[in-house]
Image: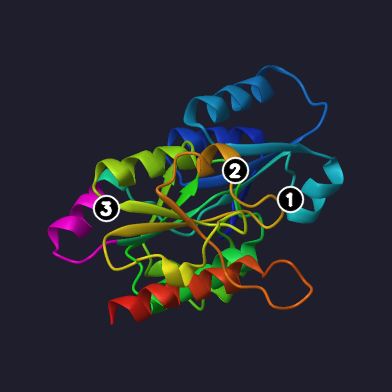
């Protein structure tokens, strides 16, 4: 069975996966076994769906229905193919500006970033299939509906998106406090993609090794970092300023 944002029940989730329902994440009860449960696990693995094993109390909070040990969150949007999106932007004659999000975990940060991205003319957002925040009601609310206007792509690993951008002539710039220079010293005028890292870890070190440039924001106070959605806004509006 399902409501607007969730599907619950092992068989119902399996059938939803087979029907190509856009599923953001599946929560499964720790310690369960059995043929049907193993079939669900196999379907999740074969489709590369984000999943996690949780206590039954978590599932009970997600739904009051008879979940049988599994609850899935449905994405309220469809996802774009990265090849088609990048090609369409290039062919449109626009100067590409993309945003890559390396496993952000907070849905409200994600929603706020989508809202800012839509306001600053970002052509699309690329996220990783696993490890990131789901797109749910809180995302929709904090994005002020921008989630329905912004093309979003999913890739197996954020490095896949980096390599795709670079092969398409798009420079990839990492927003990181590890950078040697400030964002004001980096050019955003040419085709580029900005990477923002997760709230706790930042950008994966393996991703930092393959980007074209790195930039940081000046921090004048005692706190060493900004909220990721605020930092993202600063980077995007610097791109707007340079392109104006």
Q: How many C-alpha atoms fall within 10 Å of the one at disc 3: few (<14), some, or many (≥20)?
A: some
Q: To which residue does mark 2 refer?
A: 204
Q: Is residue 223 left or right of residue 153?
A: right
Total number of numbered discs in the rendering: 3
Residue 133, picture quadrant: bottom right
Cα distance, mark 2 to mark 1?
38 Å
Give the overall secondary structure of the magenta segment: helix
Q: Is residue 120 left or right of residue 228?
A: left
- Between discs 2 and 1, the one toward the N terminus: 1
The answer to whether any part of residue 146 appears in the image is: no
**Does the residue at mark 1 contact the one at mark 3 (Cβ under 8 Å)?**
no
Residue for point 32% across, 64% down: 123
Q: To which residue does mark 1 refer?
A: 65
| 93 part of magenta stretch | yes
Percent of width and height locating residue 14: 55, 32
Residue for point 66% across, 73% down: 219
The answer to whether any part of residue 84 appears in the image is: yes
Pick the front one: 172 or 20: 172
Q: Secondary structure at mark 1?
A: loop
Q: How many C-alpha atoms fall within 10 Å of the one at disc 1: few (<14), some, or many (≥20)?
A: some
Instruction: Say if 62 sits above or below 218 in the image.
Output: above
- Between discs 1 and 3, the one toward the N terminus: 1
Q: Secondary structure at mark 2?
A: loop
Percent of width and height locating residue 168: 24, 46
Magenta span of residues:
84-96
Q: To which residue does mark 3 refer?
A: 85
Instruction: Say if 168 sits above or below 98 in the image.
Output: above
**Does the residue at mark 2 contact the one at mark 1 (Cβ under 8 Å)?**
no
- Between discs 3 and 2, the one toward the N terminus: 3
Colour logic: rainbow
Residue for point 73% across, 42% down: 67
């Amino acid at each position: 069975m399902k409501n607007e944002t969730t599907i619950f029940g092992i068989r119902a989730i399996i059938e939803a996966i087979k029907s190509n329902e856009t599923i953001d994440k599946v929560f499964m009860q720790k310690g369960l076994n059995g043929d049907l449960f193993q079939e669900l696990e196999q379907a999740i693995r074969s489709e590369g769906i984000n999943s996690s094993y949780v206590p039954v109390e978590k599932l009970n909070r997600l739904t009051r229905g008879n979940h049988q040990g599994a609850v899935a969150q449905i994405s309220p949007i469809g996802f774009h193919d990265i090849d088609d999106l990048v090609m369409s932007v290039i062919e449109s004659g626009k100067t590409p500006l993309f945003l890559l999000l390396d496993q952000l975990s907070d849905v409200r940060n994600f929603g706020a970033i989508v809202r800012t991205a839509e306001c600053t003319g970002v052509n699309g957002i690329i996220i990783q299939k696993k490890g990131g925040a789901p797109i749910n009601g809180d995302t929709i609310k904090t994005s002020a509906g921008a989630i329905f206007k912004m093309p979003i792509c999913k890739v197996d690993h954020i490095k896949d998106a980096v390599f795709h951008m670079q092969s398409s002539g798009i420079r990839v710039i990492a927003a990181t406090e590890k950078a040697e220079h400030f964002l004001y010293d980096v050019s955003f005028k040419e085709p580029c993609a900005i990477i923002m890292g997760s709230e706790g870890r930042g950008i994966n070190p393996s991703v930092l090794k393959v980007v074209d440039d790195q930039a940081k924001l000046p921090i004048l106070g005692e706190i060493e970092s900004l909220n990721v959605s605020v930092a993202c806004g600063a980077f995007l509006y610097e791109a707007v300023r340079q392109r104006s």
